[in-house]
Image (tube, rainbow, N blue to C red):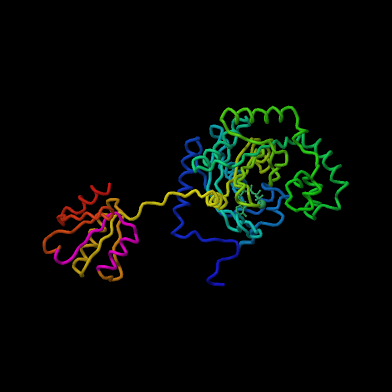
Amino acid sequence: MLTKAPRGTKDVLPSDIYRWTYLENMFRDICEKFGYREIRTPIFEHTELFKRGVGETTDIVQKEMYTFTDNGGRNITLKPEGTAPVVRAFIENKLYADVQPTKLFYNTPCFRYERPQAGRLRAFHQFGVEVFGASNPSVDAEVISIAMTFFESLSLNNLELKINSIGCSKCRKDYNKVLKKFLQERMDNLCKTCVERYEKNPMRIIDCKNKDCQEVLNDVPLITYYICEECKDHFEGLQKILTLMGLGFEINPRIVRGLDYYNRTAFEIISKEIGSQSTVCGGGRYDGLVEDIGGPETPGVGFGLGIERLILTLEKNNIEIPTPRGLEVFIVAMGSRAHDKALEISYKLRKNGVSVDIDHLGRSLKAQFKYSNKLNSLYTIVIGDDELDRGTISLKNMDTGNQEEIKLDSVVDEVIERVK
Ligand code: ATP
Ligand code: MG
């Protein structure tokens, strides 16, 4: 127990962290280019927020939340997704009183009690964006284009963008009647969760992953063909803009997304290579959510993008993330006088922005050189008693093998000049 992490969790080790920082920096850069600003919300929230904000008929609320009572008797849940907390923060901090739209992005851990498998963890991470205060389809297109730009910047060009419109509360009413009539005759073949969904949110049944349910749904009537004129205009507007942007897409009327609060646009970006957990990014519009949680009537649209699934997709496509350059300088020191000098020089160099390491284990000269190689250092400084007596050090360029003598009192300047 003590030396085993809980099921469904994963360490990111130092040997792998460069991929994460690379992706994080790239995502941040792209969002900022699109005029989005970062928001960070706490890891946990009141359970009530997710019940309301994600929806009672969702898998997340029904079976996946990490919920506990804290010492003050509060009902708390670890963030299972990013949208509800951002909506809460938008309302609580009155961001709606600022110039609209509010364009936000985030990078957050998420927690869901699910059956762990490739691309499905219990502790995972999401990038996401949310836009509040604009209902024009150009915003839906902008949100989608952020994700597509990100994938393109990673040379992931074979992902599929699937879009749908799931209408609004107005058209959903009529559609639900048709849908319920269809489902009523097939209730015996639906899973228990879907039977529960039948009353509260029958459209969610279309998203059920149960095989028997999927069979029932083979010829289910789909909302796309029942949406009202306004929703139709919105959906056509989105398609027009995506086409203008040169983004290929496919309309898939079966995409209804996992959360209760979606309306109009729903979309998924799929990687066929990563098997059954193939949705790398999913999102859509949620015009009623802000009001539902207690804020002013405010439209919203956003997406969540699973970082672990993204990394899996990159691996399956043999896309390498550039490895970072190694250490700039390693100092090999022989003898205690030299070691003291090495400490002094290393500190000065570090303060001047040069990455430096030295031996702390009393290694032999040969072993220190070997260690310097392993750290992939650009330069190795050698300090020994002889050098100290002469008032010099020797500086070796590890790529060319070229070695030069440098005056001890100018070593910091000389090294900075070569490294920068
Ligand atoms: P799925 O249909 O695969 O269960 P979802 O609809 O539950 O996904 P969302 O709630 O939309 O997923 O989350 C957005 C993204 O977060 C997903 O597209 C996926 O990339 C990622 N994601 C969701 N659940 C997990 C998980 N348990 N482990 C790793 N990544 C996940
Ligand atoms: Mg899920």
Q: Residue at x 21, y 70 (%)?
A: 336
| Front in this rendered view, residue 323 or 113 | 323
Point out residue 213 in the picture as x, y percentages from the top left corner: 79, 51
Q: Is residue 42 visible?
A: no
Q: Position of residue 2 (x, y in %)?
A: 54, 72
Q: In front here: 102 or 60?
A: 60
Q: How many marks?
A: 0
Q: Nearer the viewer, residue 332 or 174?
A: 332
Q: Which residues are magenta?
A: 365-386
Left or right relative to 159: residue 13: left
Q: Is residue 299 magenta?
A: no
Q: Position of residue 28 (x, y in %)?
A: 48, 43
Residue that extends furthest to the right in the rendered view of this protein: 185
Left of 288 or right of it: where is 195?
A: right
Name above or below for residue 231 compared with residue 93. above
Q: Is residue 295 visible?
A: yes
Check the image and name the residue furthest to the left: 390
